[in-house]
Image: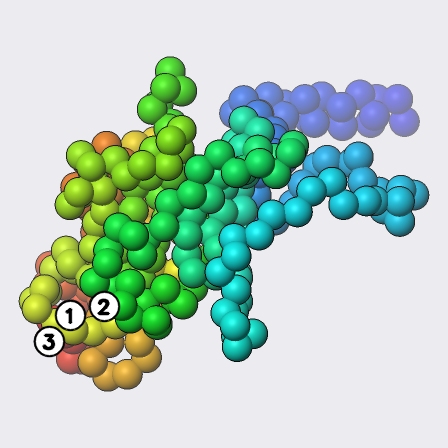
Amino acid sequence: MERIIIICLFLLFLISSCKGPASPSKDYSGWRTYAGMKDGSRYSSNDQINRNNVARLEIAWKYSSHDKDTGNRSQNQCNPIMVDGILYGTTPRLKLFALNAATGEQQWLFDPAQDDTAAGKDPFAFFKISRGVAYWEDEAAKDKRIFYSVGSKTYCINAIDGKKVSSFGTNGFIDLSKNLDRDDGSNSFVAGTTPGIIYKDLLIIGARLSESADAAPGHIRAYDVHNGKRRWIFHTIPHPGEFGYDTWTDKEAGKS
């Protein structure tokens, strides 16, 4: 019996030694990314609040953007993030705010209606959905940026002072209805409702589209976080020469 146990332990050692180095465990104690982590798990490992004390929670502070619709039709689907003690989120009219997470004190507020006065005349323009924001910083943590979408515009905002980063895209934003490898003159509905994710120096993002026959293509794109230039695009309907193109009966489908 001892010999069998020794052999089993030896085999177990051989199997474990063939594996690569264990990957470091993820830190689920923060909330720097939409949905908690880039894996979208919405899980937190924090245990300060539990079944034994949850009934004793009290309100620490309240914050209101004061842009609730008077007809009580407002909605807010934002999942805020917190970075270095600052809470970033959006309001029902898609203003972007930064709050001191400990006190609720507003650090700054960016109002897209003030930036785009023409769009501000359209009441619907600022009732599109914003589910959150994406955060990026450089290695020295001196250049900090928030990316979030208002309709088809994805803004790049300085996370320190709430001002547009004018060197990004077109005076601080990119237009998601453009750079889809089709005729940019199309009027198809395109809106950024769910924030993209940051990978190194890329903002990877999709878009919300209409569901009619003339809908814009739902391609996935990556933009340079520094200047807003498109770095790559994944065609969800493959173009000629791309993998899967030969499986489509309609060879013109990718041109729509």
The residue shown at (36%, 19%) is 142
Amino acid type, mark 1: Gly
The residue shown at (8%, 68%) is 185
Local packing at callout 2 (Cα closer than 10 Å; few below 14, some 14-19, many 20+) is: many
The residue shown at (30%, 32%) is 201
The residue shown at (50%, 69%) is 69
How far is disc 1 from disc 2 in space, using C-alphas? 8 Å
| Residue nearer the viewer, 21 or 208 | 208
Q: Which residue is mark 3?
A: 252
Q: Is residue 55 left or right of residue 145?
A: right
Residue 109, given in percent of the width and then of the height, sits at 42, 43
Amino acid type, mark 2: Pro
| Front of the two marks 1 and 2 | 2
Q: From the viewer's perspective, is residue 78 above or below residue 38? A: below
Quadrant in the picture for the N terminus: top right
How far is disc 3 from disc 2 in space, using C-alphas? 13 Å
Q: Is residue 93 left or right of residue 149?
A: right
Q: From the viewer's perspective, is residue 8 above or below residue 152? A: above
